[in-house]
Image (spheres, rainbow, N blue to C red):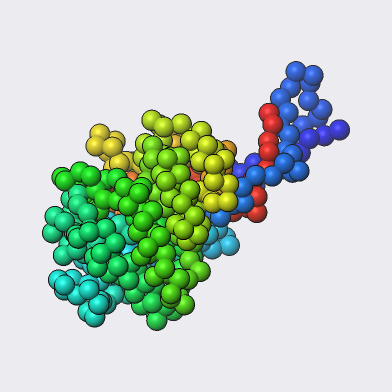
Amino acid sequence: MWFHWVTFGWPIERRRFARKKKKLPDLPENGTLLTLDFTATFQKMIGFGGAFTDSAGINLRSLPKSMQDSILEGYYGSSGLQYTIGRVPMASTDFSTHEYSYADTPGDFSLTNFSLTVEDYQYKVYFHSDYYLSWMKSNGHMKGGGVLKGKEGGEYYQTWANYFVRFFEEYHKNGIDFWGLTVQNEPTSGLNPDYGWQTMYFSAAMERDFVKNQLGPALKSSPYAKDLKLMVNDDQRYNLPEWADTILNDTEAAKYVSGIAVHWYEDLEVPAAVLTTTHQRHPDYFILASEACNGFEPLEGRPNLGDWGRAETYVNDIIADISNYVSGWTDWNICLDMQGGPNWVGNYVDSPIIINAAKQEYYKQPMWYAMGHFRWACQNVKSLM
Protein backbone atom coordinates (compact mmCIF):
# COMPACT_ATOMS: atom_id res chain seq x y z
CA MET A 1 0.00 0.00 0.00
CA TRP A 2 1.29 3.43 -0.93
CA PHE A 3 0.42 6.76 0.66
CA HIS A 4 0.02 9.71 -1.69
CA TRP A 5 0.05 13.43 -0.98
CA VAL A 6 0.54 16.71 -2.79
CA THR A 7 2.86 19.56 -1.82
CA PHE A 8 2.94 23.13 -3.08
CA GLY A 9 6.29 24.90 -3.24
CA TRP A 10 6.83 28.19 -1.41
CA PRO A 11 8.78 31.06 -3.00
CA ILE A 12 11.68 30.46 -0.62
CA GLU A 13 12.22 27.36 -2.79
CA ARG A 14 11.72 29.50 -5.91
CA ARG A 15 8.86 27.21 -6.87
CA ARG A 16 5.91 29.53 -6.12
CA PHE A 17 3.07 27.10 -5.57
CA ALA A 18 4.49 24.48 -7.93
CA ARG A 19 2.43 21.30 -7.45
CA LYS A 20 4.30 18.07 -6.61
CA LYS A 21 2.86 14.60 -6.16
CA LYS A 22 4.68 12.34 -3.73
CA LYS A 23 4.19 8.86 -2.36
CA LEU A 24 5.53 6.74 0.47
CA PRO A 25 5.31 3.05 1.25
CA ASP A 26 3.45 1.82 4.34
CA LEU A 27 4.22 3.80 7.45
CA PRO A 28 6.30 2.09 10.15
CA GLU A 29 4.45 1.05 13.28
CA ASN A 30 5.60 4.13 15.17
CA GLY A 31 4.86 6.49 12.27
CA THR A 32 2.57 9.51 12.42
CA LEU A 33 -0.72 9.29 10.57
CA LEU A 34 -3.05 12.19 9.82
CA THR A 35 -6.70 11.13 9.59
CA LEU A 36 -9.45 13.30 8.11
CA ASP A 37 -12.96 12.51 9.29
CA PHE A 38 -15.38 13.94 6.74
CA THR A 39 -18.37 12.79 8.79
CA ALA A 40 -17.48 15.14 11.66
CA THR A 41 -18.30 18.61 10.35
CA PHE A 42 -18.10 21.95 12.10
CA GLN A 43 -18.74 25.55 11.02
CA LYS A 44 -19.56 26.49 7.43
CA MET A 45 -16.82 28.66 5.98
CA ILE A 46 -17.39 32.14 4.58
CA GLY A 47 -13.89 32.58 3.21
CA PHE A 48 -10.82 34.80 3.25
CA GLY A 49 -10.10 38.30 2.04
CA GLY A 50 -8.69 41.77 2.61
CA ALA A 51 -9.64 45.44 2.84
CA PHE A 52 -10.10 48.01 0.09
CA THR A 53 -8.96 51.05 2.05
CA ASP A 54 -8.21 54.40 0.42
CA SER A 55 -4.51 53.59 0.79
CA ALA A 56 -4.95 50.33 -1.09
CA GLY A 57 -6.76 52.17 -3.88
CA ILE A 58 -4.17 54.94 -4.07
CA ASN A 59 -1.36 52.42 -4.34
CA LEU A 60 -3.15 50.33 -6.95
CA ARG A 61 -3.75 53.42 -9.08
CA SER A 62 -0.05 54.30 -8.94
CA LEU A 63 0.63 51.32 -11.23
CA PRO A 64 -0.28 50.65 -14.87
CA LYS A 65 -3.69 49.12 -15.48
CA SER A 66 -2.17 45.75 -16.37
CA MET A 67 -0.40 45.57 -13.01
CA GLN A 68 -3.53 46.64 -11.15
CA ASP A 69 -5.41 43.81 -12.84
CA SER A 70 -2.60 41.39 -11.99
CA ILE A 71 -2.78 42.24 -8.28
CA LEU A 72 -6.56 41.89 -8.14
CA GLU A 73 -6.47 38.65 -10.14
CA GLY A 74 -3.81 37.40 -7.76
CA TYR A 75 -6.11 38.00 -4.83
CA TYR A 76 -9.60 37.31 -6.18
CA GLY A 77 -9.20 35.51 -9.49
CA SER A 78 -9.42 31.81 -10.26
CA SER A 79 -5.67 31.71 -10.89
CA GLY A 80 -4.87 33.45 -7.61
CA LEU A 81 -5.73 33.15 -3.92
CA GLN A 82 -9.46 33.03 -4.73
CA TYR A 83 -10.43 35.49 -1.98
CA THR A 84 -14.16 35.72 -1.33
CA ILE A 85 -14.23 38.66 1.12
CA GLY A 86 -13.65 42.37 0.54
CA ARG A 87 -13.84 44.85 3.42
CA VAL A 88 -14.80 48.44 2.60
CA PRO A 89 -14.71 51.35 5.08
CA MET A 90 -17.60 53.80 5.28
CA ALA A 91 -15.71 57.04 4.47
CA SER A 92 -12.19 57.70 5.78
CA THR A 93 -9.92 55.65 8.02
CA ASP A 94 -6.40 56.27 9.25
CA PHE A 95 -5.44 54.62 5.95
CA SER A 96 -6.63 57.69 4.05
CA THR A 97 -4.76 60.88 3.20
CA HIS A 98 -7.19 63.00 5.26
CA GLU A 99 -10.40 62.83 7.29
CA TYR A 100 -13.69 63.00 5.43
CA SER A 101 -17.30 61.90 5.76
CA TYR A 102 -20.33 61.91 3.48
CA ALA A 103 -22.39 64.48 5.41
CA ASP A 104 -20.24 67.29 6.77
CA THR A 105 -23.00 69.90 7.15
CA PRO A 106 -23.63 70.45 10.90
CA GLY A 107 -27.24 69.88 11.91
CA ASP A 108 -28.16 68.07 8.68
CA PHE A 109 -30.27 65.46 10.47
CA SER A 110 -32.18 64.68 7.26
CA LEU A 111 -28.86 64.01 5.46
CA THR A 112 -29.94 66.26 2.61
CA ASN A 113 -26.31 66.95 1.71
CA PHE A 114 -25.16 63.32 1.88
CA SER A 115 -22.88 62.40 -1.03
CA LEU A 116 -20.08 59.99 -1.81
CA THR A 117 -16.62 61.46 -2.31
CA VAL A 118 -13.90 61.22 -4.93
CA GLU A 119 -12.27 58.46 -2.88
CA ASP A 120 -15.33 56.23 -3.32
CA TYR A 121 -15.24 56.56 -7.07
CA GLN A 122 -11.48 56.31 -7.48
CA TYR A 123 -10.32 53.92 -4.77
CA LYS A 124 -12.72 51.71 -3.24
CA VAL A 125 -17.86 42.97 0.01
CA TYR A 126 -18.60 43.81 3.44
CA PHE A 127 -18.36 47.17 4.99
CA HIS A 128 -17.42 48.46 8.41
CA SER A 129 -18.14 51.69 10.21
CA ASP A 130 -15.02 53.23 11.62
CA TYR A 131 -15.53 56.79 11.18
CA TYR A 132 -17.96 59.43 12.01
CA LEU A 133 -19.46 62.83 11.51
CA SER A 134 -17.54 65.30 13.69
CA TRP A 135 -20.65 67.40 14.28
CA MET A 136 -22.42 64.36 15.73
CA LYS A 137 -19.63 63.38 18.17
CA SER A 138 -19.30 64.62 21.73
CA ASN A 139 -15.71 65.84 21.21
CA GLY A 140 -16.51 67.63 17.93
CA HIS A 141 -13.84 65.70 16.00
CA MET A 142 -13.60 62.45 14.05
CA LYS A 143 -10.27 61.76 15.77
CA GLY A 144 -10.12 60.83 19.44
CA GLY A 145 -12.56 59.21 21.82
CA GLY A 146 -16.15 60.30 22.20
CA VAL A 147 -19.76 59.22 21.85
CA LEU A 148 -22.73 60.26 19.79
CA LYS A 149 -24.23 63.49 21.09
CA GLY A 150 -27.56 63.68 22.83
CA LYS A 151 -29.46 61.08 24.76
CA GLU A 152 -29.22 57.45 23.70
CA GLY A 153 -31.89 56.77 21.10
CA GLY A 154 -32.26 60.45 20.25
CA GLU A 155 -32.01 62.24 16.91
CA TYR A 156 -28.25 61.81 16.64
CA TYR A 157 -28.61 58.04 16.98
CA GLN A 158 -31.39 57.88 14.41
CA THR A 159 -29.45 60.06 11.99
CA TRP A 160 -26.41 57.83 12.41
CA ALA A 161 -28.53 54.78 11.56
CA ASN A 162 -29.97 56.57 8.53
CA TYR A 163 -26.41 57.43 7.44
CA PHE A 164 -25.67 53.71 7.12
CA VAL A 165 -28.70 53.23 4.90
CA ARG A 166 -27.79 56.19 2.69
CA PHE A 167 -24.33 54.68 2.19
CA PHE A 168 -25.81 51.45 0.85
CA GLU A 169 -28.32 53.28 -1.32
CA GLU A 170 -25.63 55.47 -2.91
CA TYR A 171 -23.38 52.50 -3.61
CA HIS A 172 -26.34 50.64 -5.13
CA LYS A 173 -26.83 53.55 -7.53
CA ASN A 174 -23.27 52.91 -8.69
CA GLY A 175 -23.87 49.20 -9.23
CA ILE A 176 -22.34 47.92 -5.99
CA ASP A 177 -24.26 45.95 -3.38
CA PHE A 178 -22.91 44.50 -0.16
CA TRP A 179 -23.08 41.22 1.74
CA GLY A 180 -22.80 42.52 5.30
CA LEU A 181 -21.65 45.17 7.73
CA THR A 182 -20.38 45.65 11.25
CA VAL A 183 -22.01 48.06 13.67
CA GLN A 184 -18.80 49.72 14.72
CA ASN A 185 -15.07 49.27 14.29
CA GLU A 186 -13.27 48.73 17.63
CA PRO A 187 -15.91 50.51 19.72
CA THR A 188 -13.94 50.22 22.96
CA SER A 189 -11.15 52.40 21.52
CA GLY A 190 -13.57 55.32 21.81
CA LEU A 191 -13.01 55.36 25.58
CA ASN A 192 -9.57 56.89 25.00
CA PRO A 193 -9.92 60.68 24.57
CA ASP A 194 -6.45 60.81 23.00
CA TYR A 195 -6.98 57.94 20.55
CA GLY A 196 -4.78 58.60 17.53
CA TRP A 197 -7.35 58.48 14.72
CA GLN A 198 -11.07 58.20 14.01
CA THR A 199 -13.14 56.35 16.58
CA MET A 200 -16.36 56.47 18.57
CA TYR A 201 -17.38 54.67 21.75
CA PHE A 202 -20.15 52.15 22.17
CA SER A 203 -20.47 49.80 25.12
CA ALA A 204 -22.06 46.41 24.50
CA ALA A 205 -25.32 47.69 26.01
CA MET A 206 -25.22 50.84 23.86
CA GLU A 207 -24.57 48.76 20.74
CA ARG A 208 -27.43 46.41 21.69
CA ASP A 209 -29.88 49.29 22.06
CA PHE A 210 -28.66 51.01 18.88
CA VAL A 211 -29.14 47.81 16.89
CA LYS A 212 -32.52 47.11 18.45
CA ASN A 213 -34.04 50.58 18.23
CA GLN A 214 -32.37 52.42 15.35
CA LEU A 215 -29.93 50.54 13.10
CA GLY A 216 -31.77 47.24 12.75
CA PRO A 217 -35.14 48.81 11.84
CA ALA A 218 -33.45 51.31 9.51
CA LEU A 219 -31.64 48.56 7.59
CA LYS A 220 -34.80 46.47 7.30
CA SER A 221 -36.66 49.46 5.87
CA SER A 222 -34.33 49.72 2.86
CA PRO A 223 -34.57 47.37 -0.15
CA TYR A 224 -30.78 47.65 -0.52
CA ALA A 225 -29.91 46.90 3.12
CA LYS A 226 -32.65 44.63 4.44
CA ASP A 227 -30.81 41.38 3.69
CA LEU A 228 -27.35 42.42 4.89
CA LYS A 229 -25.52 40.30 7.46
CA LEU A 230 -25.12 42.53 10.53
CA MET A 231 -22.14 41.75 12.79
CA VAL A 232 -21.51 42.99 16.33
CA ASN A 233 -18.32 43.56 18.37
CA ASP A 234 -15.76 44.08 15.53
CA ASP A 235 -13.19 44.42 18.31
CA GLN A 236 -10.65 42.29 20.17
CA ARG A 237 -11.16 38.84 21.69
CA TYR A 238 -11.13 40.32 25.18
CA ASN A 239 -14.73 41.48 24.67
CA LEU A 240 -15.92 37.90 24.25
CA PRO A 241 -18.10 36.15 25.16
CA GLU A 242 -19.66 38.94 27.26
CA TRP A 243 -20.20 41.37 24.36
CA ALA A 244 -22.06 38.73 22.40
CA ASP A 245 -24.03 37.73 25.50
CA THR A 246 -25.23 41.28 26.11
CA ILE A 247 -26.57 41.70 22.58
CA LEU A 248 -27.65 38.22 21.56
CA ASN A 249 -29.44 37.39 24.81
CA ASP A 250 -31.83 40.23 23.95
CA THR A 251 -34.21 38.70 21.42
CA GLU A 252 -35.32 42.07 20.03
CA ALA A 253 -31.71 43.01 19.21
CA ALA A 254 -30.61 39.51 18.21
CA LYS A 255 -33.21 39.23 15.45
CA TYR A 256 -31.26 41.82 13.44
CA VAL A 257 -27.84 40.18 13.95
CA SER A 258 -26.17 37.44 11.88
CA GLY A 259 -22.66 37.25 13.27
CA ILE A 260 -19.85 38.34 15.56
CA ALA A 261 -16.72 40.05 14.20
CA VAL A 262 -13.35 39.90 15.95
CA HIS A 263 -9.93 41.51 15.45
CA TRP A 264 -6.56 39.88 16.05
CA TYR A 265 -4.51 42.58 17.80
CA GLU A 266 -4.75 41.11 21.30
CA ASP A 267 -4.78 37.45 20.28
CA LEU A 268 -1.53 36.70 22.11
CA GLU A 269 -3.12 37.94 25.34
CA VAL A 270 -6.50 36.20 25.03
CA PRO A 271 -6.76 32.48 24.19
CA ALA A 272 -8.69 31.36 21.13
CA ALA A 273 -10.84 29.23 23.43
CA VAL A 274 -13.05 32.28 24.08
CA LEU A 275 -14.21 31.91 20.47
CA THR A 276 -15.40 28.36 21.14
CA THR A 277 -17.15 29.54 24.30
CA THR A 278 -18.85 32.28 22.30
CA HIS A 279 -19.93 29.79 19.65
CA GLN A 280 -21.27 27.36 22.23
CA ARG A 281 -23.37 30.09 23.81
CA HIS A 282 -24.58 31.46 20.47
CA PRO A 283 -24.35 28.63 17.90
CA ASP A 284 -26.74 30.26 15.43
CA TYR A 285 -24.39 33.21 14.79
CA PHE A 286 -21.20 32.95 12.73
CA ILE A 287 -17.86 34.36 13.90
CA LEU A 288 -15.74 36.27 11.38
CA ALA A 289 -12.15 37.42 11.92
CA SER A 290 -12.56 40.89 10.45
CA GLU A 291 -9.12 42.54 10.69
CA ALA A 292 -5.46 41.58 11.02
CA CYS A 293 -2.09 42.97 9.99
CA ASN A 294 1.57 42.78 10.90
CA GLY A 295 3.84 45.68 11.78
CA PHE A 296 1.32 47.42 14.04
CA GLU A 297 3.52 47.42 17.16
CA PRO A 298 5.72 50.56 17.48
CA LEU A 299 9.02 48.65 17.41
CA GLU A 300 8.05 46.12 14.72
CA GLY A 301 9.15 48.25 11.80
CA ARG A 302 6.20 48.60 9.35
CA PRO A 303 6.84 46.77 6.06
CA ASN A 304 9.61 44.22 6.38
CA LEU A 305 10.15 42.74 2.95
CA GLY A 306 10.63 38.99 2.86
CA ASP A 307 9.79 38.36 6.52
CA TRP A 308 8.75 34.70 6.85
CA GLY A 309 8.05 35.13 10.55
CA ARG A 310 5.15 37.36 9.65
CA ALA A 311 3.82 34.71 7.30
CA GLU A 312 3.89 32.26 10.20
CA THR A 313 1.87 34.61 12.41
CA TYR A 314 -0.88 34.63 9.77
CA VAL A 315 -0.86 30.84 9.47
CA ASN A 316 -0.88 30.29 13.23
CA ASP A 317 -3.70 32.75 13.81
CA ILE A 318 -5.87 31.38 11.00
CA ILE A 319 -5.48 27.79 12.20
CA ALA A 320 -6.26 28.79 15.79
CA ASP A 321 -9.33 30.74 14.69
CA ILE A 322 -10.72 28.05 12.41
CA SER A 323 -10.12 25.44 15.11
CA ASN A 324 -12.36 27.53 17.37
CA TYR A 325 -15.37 28.02 15.10
CA VAL A 326 -14.31 31.11 13.16
CA SER A 327 -15.86 31.03 9.68
CA GLY A 328 -13.55 33.40 7.82
CA TRP A 329 -10.45 35.56 8.13
CA THR A 330 -9.94 39.08 6.75
CA ASP A 331 -6.60 40.79 6.26
CA TRP A 332 -6.34 44.58 6.53
CA ASN A 333 -4.95 46.59 3.54
CA ILE A 334 -4.57 44.45 0.42
CA CYS A 335 -1.58 46.60 -0.58
CA LEU A 336 0.48 49.47 0.81
CA ASP A 337 3.49 51.54 -0.25
CA MET A 338 7.10 51.07 0.81
CA GLN A 339 6.48 53.05 4.00
CA GLY A 340 3.34 51.13 4.90
CA GLY A 341 0.87 53.84 3.94
CA PRO A 342 -0.30 56.35 3.06
CA ASN A 343 -1.70 56.95 6.53
CA TRP A 344 -2.71 60.43 7.60
CA VAL A 345 -1.62 59.88 11.24
CA GLY A 346 1.56 57.91 10.50
CA ASN A 347 0.15 54.56 11.67
CA TYR A 348 2.18 52.60 9.13
CA VAL A 349 1.91 48.79 8.99
CA ASP A 350 2.76 45.86 6.71
CA SER A 351 0.77 44.24 3.91
CA PRO A 352 0.96 41.05 1.82
CA ILE A 353 1.66 43.21 -1.24
CA ILE A 354 3.97 46.22 -1.15
CA ILE A 355 3.97 48.65 -4.07
CA ASN A 356 7.03 50.61 -5.19
CA ALA A 357 5.47 53.31 -7.33
CA ALA A 358 8.83 54.94 -8.13
CA LYS A 359 10.04 51.76 -9.81
CA GLN A 360 6.58 50.70 -11.03
CA GLU A 361 6.95 47.39 -9.20
CA TYR A 362 5.07 45.42 -6.60
CA TYR A 363 6.32 42.72 -4.25
CA LYS A 364 4.41 39.68 -3.07
CA GLN A 365 5.37 39.16 0.53
CA PRO A 366 5.58 35.82 2.38
CA MET A 367 2.22 36.75 3.96
CA TRP A 368 0.65 36.63 0.49
CA TYR A 369 1.97 33.12 -0.07
CA ALA A 370 0.83 32.08 3.40
CA MET A 371 -2.71 33.13 2.52
CA GLY A 372 -2.47 30.92 -0.56
CA HIS A 373 -2.50 27.84 1.65
CA PHE A 374 -6.05 28.62 2.76
CA ARG A 375 -9.12 28.93 0.62
CA TRP A 376 -12.86 28.86 0.91
CA ALA A 377 -14.43 25.46 1.50
CA CYS A 378 -17.98 24.44 2.30
CA GLN A 379 -17.33 23.18 5.82
CA ASN A 380 -14.56 22.59 8.32
CA VAL A 381 -13.87 18.91 9.04
CA LYS A 382 -12.21 17.05 11.90
CA SER A 383 -8.55 16.06 11.68
CA LEU A 384 -6.64 13.77 14.02
CA MET A 385 -2.86 13.39 14.23
Q: Position of residue 170 (x, y in %)?
A: 36, 77
Quadrant (top left/top right/bottom left/bottom right) for the N terminus: top right
| Residue at 75% from the left image edge and 18% from the top image edge | 30
Percent of width and height locating residue 380: 64, 45
Compared to 182, does 69 lie above or below? below
The residue nearer to you, when weighing 342 against 162, is 162
Front position in the image: 245 or 93: 245
Splitting the image into 4 quarters, where does residue 99 fall? bottom left
On the question of residue 221 being in view, the answer is yes
Instruction: From the top left corner, tell me how far across and down residue 90 is, in percent.
Output: 32, 64
Location of residue 127 (image quadrant):
bottom left
The answer to whether residue 159 is above or below residue 71 is below
Q: How many marks?
A: 0
- Judged from this view, the residue extending furthest toward the right is 1
Q: Nearer the viewer, residue 84 or 189?
A: 189
The residue that appears at 38% across and 30% down in the rendered structure is 269
Quadrant location of the C terminus in the rendered image: top right
Q: Left or right: 125 with respect to 203?
A: right
Residue at left 41%, top 68%?
217
Residue 339 can be seen in this image: no
Is 44 in front, or is 36?
A: 44
Q: Residue 241: horizontal and vertical position, in percent? A: 45, 40
The quarter of the displayed image where residue 266 is located: top left
Residue at left 25%, top 34%? 299
